[in-house]
Image (cartoon, rainbow, N blue to C red):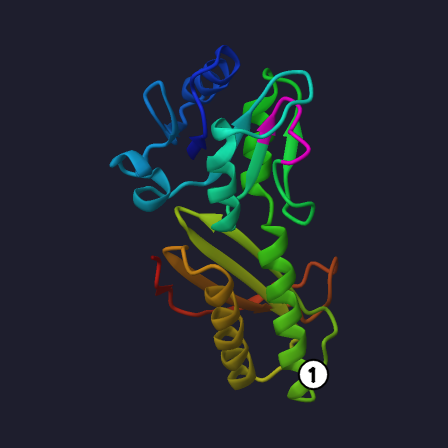
Amino acid sequence: MHILITDETTESSRNVASSFRERGHEVHTCRDGEHPGCAGLRGGRCPLDTLPIDLVVGTGTNSREHADLRHEGILCGARRRLPIMFVGIPPDDLLPPWVPLRATRSQKDAVDVAEQVVASPLPMHSALATEVLREGLTRDGTTTRGASAEVHRRDGGLRVDLVVDDSVPLRAREALTVLVHAALREMDPWSSTCDIGISTAPGGPGTGTPRASYRAGAASGGQ
């Protein structure tokens, strides 16, 4: 994974970064050496502009603190709809309450928690894709039974898995991928790709019936 740790100037942040490197992950930082603030504003290159970042990680102490320049990269990551994680106690004013944030106080567990976060569906993307999928089915007069969407981040892009009832015609499925793609690109224009697959589950969940899959071509458009 490509991990963006917003600050590596404290002992706790350096320990967290070392844990990721020891597990084989690539670690990047927002900071320009010991200088405070954004490297990009100092003429450097922002990792968010040049690398397929999978997760943004902030670090703090075991006590409540206020957000400061060491945490500003978290806001940049949140704006780009990236998964956000904090090791320590997050400042109360770090992020708006509707932005998903996974926190752990244990440095020892940080890498395990990070891998779980990256493996999990993106909640805001998945909710939007599910809403658009069901609205499209309703407009077409087809059933929304079992309709769902999961969106994951993969190598700087999005992998979208849609599920619909097997009664939905192939042409309608193709139209649904276009609708979901447009909605996700509007929400998240920073992802390098948006690869959408749509599957049917004829027997319904838990029956063991194989799924027939249709996969749309990847569409690039990262900025």
Judging depth in this view, the residue of 175 and 15 nearest the camera is: 15
Residue at far top of view: 11
Q: Is residue 102 left or right of residue 39?
A: right
Q: Is residue 87 magenta?
A: yes
- Residue drawn 64% across the image and 66% down it: 130
53 relative to 104, above or below: below
Mark 1: amino acid: Thr
Report x, y in % for residue 106.
64, 18
Q: Which residue is mark 1?
A: 138
Report x, y in % for residue 52.
37, 44
- Residue drawn 39% across the image and 31% down it: 30
- Residue drawn 63% across the image and 47% down it: 99
Q: Is residue 118 left or right of residue 17?
A: right
Judging depth in this view, the residue of 17 and 149 nearest the camera is: 17
Residue at far left of view: 43
- Residue drawn 46% across the image and 43% down it: 76
Q: Quadrant of residue 141?
A: bottom right
Report x, y in % for residue 19.
48, 17
Report x, y in % for residue 9.
43, 16
Q: Is residue 198 magenta?
A: no
Q: Main secondary structure of the magenta part?
A: loop
Q: Which residues are magenta?
A: 86-93
Judging depth in this view, the residue of 194 and 64 nearest the camera is: 64
Q: Residues within 10 Å of mark 1 (few under 14, many from 20)?
A: few
Q: Is residue 178 left or right of residue 60?
A: left
For the residue labelled by badge 1, is the local secondary structure a helix, a strand or a loop? helix
Task: Residue 167: tell me if it is visible.
Answer: no
98 relative to 101, above or below: below
Q: Is residue 210 left or right of residue 191?
A: right
Q: Quadrant of residue 43?
A: top left
